[in-house]
Every structure is written in C-alpha cells, then in structure tokens.
Amino acid sequence: MIEALSERFRRAYVIVTRATLVPVMVRMAVFAALLGALVVTLPPSVIEPRTVLPLLLVAALPAVAPRGPTTTLAIVAIVVAWVVTTAGAGERIALWRLLTLAAFLYLAHGLAALAAVLPTDAVVSADVLARWVARTAAVVLTASVLGVLLVSVSGIGGNDTLLTAGVVGLGIAVAAAALLAWMARRRA
C-alpha cells in the first residue's frame, strides 16, 4: 500500500514538473469559469468564510481532473444551486445573471473538454488557442443575442409563447442529442 501511494506521488511529481504553460492556463481558466459561475449563481449572503472552501473545491476539482465526472457534477451542482436560489428568493430572473451564468458554464464545459484532451506537457501554438477562444467567444455572443431576442419575443405573446418556446427548445435539444448518438453509432 505504501509503495502504491509513493508511486502515485512520483507520478504526480513528474506531471507537475513537466507541465507547460498553455495546459496549465487552460486548467486555470476552467477554475476561473466555474468560480465565476458560482459567484453569479449564489447570493452574496451565502458567500461567507465558512463556505469559501467548499466553493473553491467545487471549482478546483474539474480543473485538476477534467477527464472524470467532476466537470459534469460541478456544472449540475451550480445549475441546481441557481434554481434553488432563484426559486427560493421568489424574485424575477435577471437576464444579465442568466446570460452570464450560461456563458461561464459554456466556457467551463468547453475548457474542461480542451483540458481533458490536452496533455499537461503539451507544447501548444498560441494560434491554436487563439482560434479556440475566438470560436468560443462567437458561440457565447451568438447564444446571448439569440437568447435576448427569444426572451423579448416571448414577452410579447405572454406565458403561452414562453411555454411554446421552451417546448420547442427542448425538442430541438432532444433531436440534436439523438442525431449525435446516431452519428456516433454509425461511425463505430
């Protein structure tokens, strides 16, 4: 048991000493995006000295281990916290908070996916990272603009329009997931 533990420490030491700048920056960005999502999600009264450590752990675990289920669990925990705090407060949903949260979660998800496939000792060109950041920024900007447009259109028709838009959006999400699953099975 001690030998296995010392072997793990040796592997961790090698990984840390061989790490290059870009993979470390990507993992730091995962941490920052999840921490930003937590700050936007939680009301200021919840963020106090005794809750800081658990919040930092929720943001840090996906940055340290992006390949496992930690990223999904962190994102689900943040979404559940947002729903609970929003429903518990009984106030209207602020559009800026919702869009900021969605942007942070998208960035965290995408960055964690990049960190999962990027070895910590990889030498990555700055052009590759710049193209990835530009593509991600374009997706976030497009989704934000479309989100604002959909929210403004849903306000015109009342609650029925909002319900219809939600059902159509859910149908599109299910259809996209089914298409991706079909494409994955076809390739295998």
Image (tube, rainbow, N blue to C red):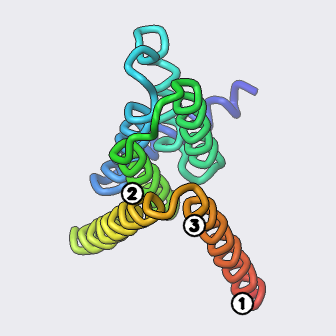
Amino acid type for the residue under numbered disc 2: Asp
Q: Residue furthest top?
A: 50
Labels 2 & 1 near each other (Cβ < 8 A): no
**Residue 165, numbered circle:** 3
* Circle 2 residues within 10 Å: few <14, some 14–19, many ≥20: some
**Residue at screen point 69% across, 78% down:** 175
Observer able to see residue 119 = no
Q: Nearer the viewer, mark 3 or mark 2?
A: 3
**109 sits left or right of 174 in the view:** left
Q: Nearer the viewer, residue 144 or 177?
A: 144
Label 2 vs 1, first from the N-terminus:
2
Query: Where does residue 153 sit, x and y in percent of width and height?
Result: 42, 66
Amino acid type for the residue under numbered disc 3: Ala
Q: Please determine whether, in this image, residue 136 is positioned above or below residue 16.
A: below
Circle 1 sits on which residue? 187
**Residue 121, numbered circle:** 2
Real-space Cα separation, disc 3 to disc 2, in angstroms: 45 Å
Amino acid type for the residue under numbered disc 1: Arg
Labels 3 & 2 near each other (Cβ < 8 A): no
